Image (cartoon, coloured by chain):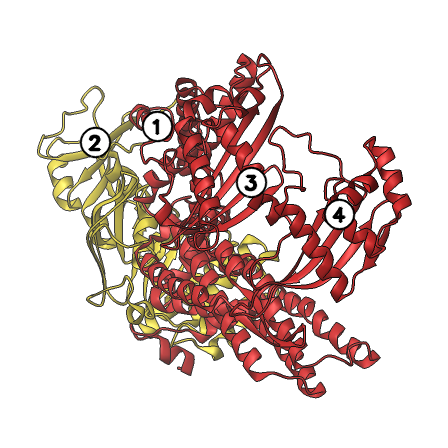
Chain colours: A yellow, B red
Amino acid sequence: MIEVKDLVKTFDGFPALDGANITVPDGGVYGLVGPNGAGKSTVIRHLTGIYRPDSGQVLVEGEGVYENPEKKALLAAIPDDWYFFPSATIRDMMRFYRGFYPGFDASRYEKFKEVFSIPERSVIRRLSKGMQKQAAFWLTMCCRPKYLILDEPVDGLDPVMRRQVWSLMMSDVTEHGTTVLVSSHNLRELEDVCDHVGIMNKGRVLIERSLSALQENIVKLQAVWKPGEAPVLPRELEVLHTSHVGRVYTYIVRGKAPEVTERLERHEPLMLEALPLSLEEIFIYELGGEHYAVKEIIL
Amino acid sequence: MNWEVSTMLSKRSFFNPVLFQKNLTRFWPLWGGLSLLGSLAPLYMLLALLSGAGRNLGSLDFTFALYEVTASAGPVVFFLYAIICAALVWSYLYNPRAVGLMHTLPAGRTCLFVTGVLSGLTMLLIPCAVVGALVCLIALSWGFFDLMAVANTVLAILLLALIFFGLATFCAMLTGHALALPVLYGLVNFLAPLLEALIVSLSSEFLIGLEIRSSGWTIALSPVIKLTESLSVRSITELEGERGVVTGYLLDGFGVLGLWGLAGAALLGLAWLLYRLRSSESAGDAAAFPWLRPVFRYGLSLLSALTLGRLLYELIRAALFLSSRYANRAVMAVCMALAAVVGYYIASMLLEKSLRVFRGSARGVALATAAAAAVCLLASYDLFGAERRVPELEEISQVEFYDNGLYLLCTAAEDPELLAQIRDLHQTIVADRDYVRSAADYPSNVPGQRRYHSLRLTYTLRNGTRLKRYYAFWVLEGRVADPSTYDGKLAALFSAPQVILDQFALQEGGVLTGMHCLNHYEGAALELDGEQRQRVYEAMLRDAREGNLPGRSVLGGEPEPYAMSIELQYRTPAQPSGYDYGYKEMQVYPTMMNTLHTLLELELVSREQLEQWDEELGISSVLERTEEGC
């Protein structure tokens, strides 16, 4: 299990992390989402042992990860700006990784030659951005990490390769119990793979739940009222957002769908329907309360 | 799990062979190219031996070549090459992406550091090993191999590598910017003598006598200068008849090398501590630690004040026609304060990587300005008594005097009177310091003759330290007549019999080994045999005793000599290291009756020649005078 407890990190007085708390359970896919500058990459750099915390703890299996080679050997990471030596080929980098990671699987490296159809003797610097990303996946997944940490992992990959890569990772999760922590802005994609989600903003984790719990706790209702009779909703309902098109009103309300529906039905709408929220919508409406709503800008 | 991985996963693992190998293979063009370039020397040696040109080479030549290359080229080559190796090995610390990769790897900082140090040292030593091995192979094949010389050279090279790579690694840990590293390394290597020279130079704008040269203790803090000075080849000479024969060579300077070697090791230790403390996020920053930022900011501000401030003052001096050699204290303080502000903002811009550094800088700027002005004021007042310092007679072991071509070396044991006379002159100059300052400009409104003098005094004190002073002043005819002025004392010193004698006389225990009579008119050089040289030398001594040798004049205008001189070759008394050889040349003047008489007797000069020279000089016939004199 990966645990981040009260993590604080400041850069020249700017608090990049302000008491972040994260718990990543074993054997699942954890999605770390948040707006730009929320502190996701900073958390990841702490998890991989690059940054030393100002205060707080970053634990892997109960032990601090900073300056702990034994725990770092359980982790492998693909940052959004993966580094390779300037004149290195994929094979050179494979030898380098093999020299550091105890679980490096050479046979897997050979098998992946067919999956990632890049010549292993290509100089990585000369490959396209997408191919460099593929090379990063190729090498990182051969390390057979127990914890795979990814920052914007599929940026630059074409749709087929995205699917291929996710499929490989999910098979590692199911077959080997690999734990994946992934930070991404592509919420649509995360929704398909994550079982836990943490939403970050301004250096803190606002919400951390399983995706299903998150979706159960917020509901989108569409209601049609009699003309001129749109009611004032009861105060005890925590309405995150209201909008309407003609007589069709849309409410985003925090709470369980049956309870919220039952409360609104008391106002006798002409039509009332509860709809599931996508992760993207949850992200937008949860952060709306944090003054991070989409602004209506008229140019 | 392969063996490399199994050995390094422990928290106590100190070395990673894969990283070591990677470092060497990544940068092979550097050490490979240098090895190839260096191999040209043994190749040249081999070709020379094969062609027969080097058939007379022996183990002494081999020893000398090894020592000479180590002593003369070693410090500079290692100074330059070490920073290149360090910059390459630690290059990942300056790139946020690279540092991300390296610090994500399952290896501790100690492991990365030790591996980096060993990689760098290996890169540094490979070319030496290649060249050394080839030279040794050739020497073995031709039978002039000297094991002790090789062992000494290897030890010296290992220490040089440790010193300069240790220093370069220490600097590498202090900064997060690739371009800042060589600048910092260069600065650290020369900082102490540079600062001393700048401060003394500033003081000499206000005070008299200060010599703008770095002293021993600041030089000792500059490894490249100190080692270049200290490492030398000493020949062991034994006397065979009258000739010294070299029987061996020694590489001097192992003491300094050893001390700096310890410093290099200590710097590596410090660098390791710094590496453990430094943050990965400092990659790209000029200063890798927050506590370094004020040091950098105020340090650059001070350097700017001492350099740019002086330059600004010179511009103002030229613009305002301030002609005095000595500076105006207030104007200098303002110039330095302005330059300090410039330095402060440049440092801030480099630290912040932005041009917007002005907001909120008032306190820092005020501090930098005040510090620069304070340095100027401190340097301008003789707070430490440097200007007033004249060593007591009992303190002095010897003094070297050099002024307008006159060089004297006086020791307390052999020349106490002359030494006291020189010290008295020094004392008088110091007492007259206000006059020296006020009369620094060309004395155009003073009647009579004048001459500019540059007097350099170097005292060696009994406690082993040296005191150097330099004075530049005008000597005026009107003051020469007054024996209480420094002009008068300098004139007395110039014409002192011992000073005249010193021009050619050998010191006690010295041996005359040769003499030539040089006729500049005919371009001829006659070699004198043992008896002839003794007679001429004794005649010259008689002339000196009888006052026939003209003294030097502090105001210039010495008498014209004949187009003839006597060159004396001599051997100094025995020293612990063997013998030193030298020569002196004495012009022949028409007043040197005894010498001229002897030269005529020995037919080293003809009567006709002397008559011709007399005619040319427009003086009465020397022949008549010589006959009268004899």
Amino acid type, mark 3: Ala
Chain letter belonging to callout 3:
B
* CA gap, disc 4 and disc 3: 25 Å
Amino acid type, mark 2: Leu
* CA gap, disc 3 and disc 1: 36 Å
* CA gap, disc 4 and disc 1: 61 Å
Q: Which residue is mark 2?
A: A270
Q: Picture quarter containing residue A260?
A: top left
Give the mark toward the camera: 2 or 4: 4
**Closer to the camera, B449 or B108?**
B449
**Dot 3 or dot 1, earlier in sequence:** 1
Q: Secondary structure at mark 2?
A: loop
* CA gap, disc 2 and disc 4: 150 Å
Q: Residue at x 19, y 38 (%)?
A: A253
- Looking at the picture, how far across and down is residue B284, in whole percent? 44, 46
- Compared to residue A186, the image places residue B9 above or below, namely below
* CA gap, disc 2 and disc 1: 97 Å
Q: Picture quarter containing residue A3?
A: bottom left
Residue B333 visible in this rendered orientation of the protein:
yes
Q: Which residue is mark 1?
A: B381
- Looking at the picture, how far across and down is residue B582, in whole percent? 65, 59
Left or right: B35 in relation to A191: right
* CA gap, disc 3 and disc 2: 128 Å
Q: Residue at x 28, y 33 (%)?
A: A292
Label of residue B21 in the image = none
Amino acid type, mark 4: Cys
Q: Which residue is mark 3?
A: B496
